[in-house]
Image: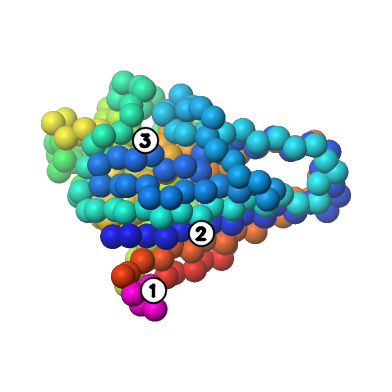
Amino acid sequence: MRLRIHHNTVYRYQTPARRIVQAMRLWPAPVAGQQVLDWQVMVGGRGLRPRSRDGFGNAEATYSADGPLDELCVGVVGQVITEDRHGVIQGSEELLDPLFYCAPSVLTQPDQALRELAERCRRHRGLEQAHQLMRVVREAVEFKTEETHSETDASEALAHGYGVCQDHAHVMIACARILQRPARYVSGYLWIDGDSVSPASHAWSELYIDDLGWVGFDPANRICPTESYVRVAVGRDARDAAPIRGLRQGGTVESLEVNVSVAQVSADPARTQSQPVQQ
């Protein structure tokens, strides 16, 4: 499948910011089943290229600007060819031993409710355990927008019983680690077709399975990632894999506008299917 992605983010400040520093993980890495044809990132009207890789292997660049700044615009446009590999990740550049991803992180700290949820899957093994865990997490956490936020952790999401894709991923990761299975967070994009429940900008989890390696699981949609998914960055939780994280001096009362569009590109441009999303 050939997918075209447009992702625009605008930060606005009620009073101008004196200085802005942003760490950006906006570049998808080529892996088996994901070929990046073209990818451009524009910040403040200028092109930005990755300068390094972070500790998780994600392509990363740091952008800084001195103000006064009333707004900052970040734009992404690119095309990727994908294929369905049933969630199995091959050809990725791995800098860390999978066991690193067994330790809890800030947004995946276990509590008693998470332990009880995980225990429902302990009798299963390997890939079967991971699929069962995906099912029980989705049953326990209803998909519901605008009720959680970027700093909602796994225990809070499970206690609420609802959340978005980020929350489903955090709950599954926390439970997998309780079962001593390496698990990590993935940020990316999803082309929506039919009854998928999540917006184009998406998140899911990857669990390490013996004899297979890293395998993706999307509890929000109850499936392993298909050719409709574009994988961008990984980390212990959403903080590590966030597309943009930064600091500023000044710039009180920040507002954020995000627009994402993922389109399936066909040979006939008139037949291109797209799903625009405003967040």
Q: Which stretch did the figure color magenta?
A: 268-272
- Looking at the picture, which amino acid does disc 3 mark? Arg
Q: Main secondary structure of the magenta part?
A: helix
What residue is shown with label 3? 184
Q: In the rendered structure, which disc, 1 or 3, sits on the residue that comes first in sequence?
A: 3
What residue is shown with label 1? 269
The residue at the point 37 percent across, 60 percent down is 3
Left or right of 234? Residue 176 is: left
Left or right of 72? Residue 78 is: left
Determine the residue located farthest toward the bottom in the rendered image. Answer: 270
What residue is shown with label 2? 6
Give the structural element (helix, strand or loop) at label 3: strand
In this rendering, the answer to whether 168 lies above or below 48 is below
Q: Position of residue 198 (x, y in %)?
A: 41, 61
Disc 2 versus disc 3: nearer the observer: 2
- Looking at the picture, which amino acid does disc 2 mark? His
Instruction: Using the image as rendered, state which of residue 185 and residue 147 is in the foreground.
Output: 185
**Is the C-beta separation of discs 1 and 3 under 8 Å?**
no
Disc 1 versus disc 2: nearer the observer: 1
